[in-house]
Amino acid sequence: MSSDVHFGGDGRRGPLENVPTECYDVLCHPQRVRLLDILGDHQTRLSLASLTTELIENGQFDVSNGRARHEVRIDLVHNHLPRLAEYNIVEWDAETGVELADEPPVHPNDLSTLLDLYESENGDQLLEALVHPVRMHVLSSLAEHDRPLSVEQLASTVASQDVDSLSDPERAKLSLYHAHLPLLADIGVLEFDHESGLVTRHEKTMSTVQISD
């Protein structure tokens, strides 16, 4: 598996292609990706205490260990675990601990892809920016056509597939123009020419989420 960044264009299953749209928001958080990786490594149920310890050991905290444990546990119990459980990605309770669900909606390869993305340069920023159904679709479309596309062309493909409930081309165009394309341009994965309305992919970033055998 590669930790370089690549989207589609070679006939293989696209990364994160089968992730349910509603899961994207849940999975774009670095701490959730990290804890899922820990659970995947252990392949067994972990107590909250053990999971907290590993998150602290694998993270960077500017506070004392005692305070860090308290903050991490509070985030797990009141934020991350309930959200992951809501989408059947983990099973947990405070007494028996946490484990990956038997049949999660996210393929293990996709979780590995997210981890590779997180561990790449500027991983936090990339993870939060790229793990979104519209933005993933834009990058896949650019890779598939291998040439600059207009905002109208991208909006048409987004609307035709009803990505993120954007079924109207004009709505999709406005969303791309004012939100998604500027954000992707800011993190350097594409160029967006406001005057011409053309969007061009950056070759060096088109391998961020490539799954290789």
Image (cartoon, grey):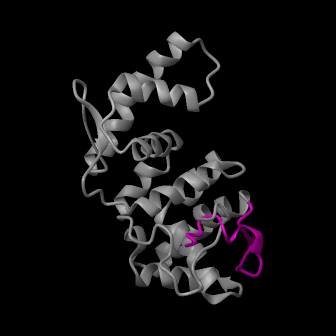
The quadrant of the image that shows the N terminus is bottom right
Q: Position of residue 61 (x, y in %)?
A: 61, 23
Determine if the magenta segment contains residue 37. no
Give above or below for 31 relative to 121.
above
Number of disc labels: 0
As drawn, 163 above or below 73: below
Q: Report if residue 176 is visible in the image.
A: yes
Which quadrant of the view contains residue 116? bottom right
Image coordinates for residue 209, horizontal then vertical, percent: 59, 65
Let me know if residue 207 is in the magenta part. yes
Q: Which residues are magenta?
A: 188-213
Position in image of residue 10 (x %, y %): 59, 86
Depicted 74 relative to depicted 114: above or below: above
Q: Is residue 193 visible?
A: no
Q: Is residue 134 left or right of residue 117?
A: left
Residue 164, percent from left and from top: 40, 67
Residue at left offset 61%, top offset 63%:
178
42 or 138: which is nearer to us? 42
Q: Residue at x 65, y 84 (%)?
A: 150
Q: Nearer the viewer, residue 33 or 180?
A: 33
Pick the quarter of the image with the C terminus: bottom right
Q: Residue at (66%, 66%) from the top-left corner? A: 5
Q: Please state if 84 lies on the left or on the right of 120 as rendered.
A: left
Please name the residue shown 47% across and 46% down the image. 37
| Quadrant of res 50 | top left
Front residue of 149/89: it is 89
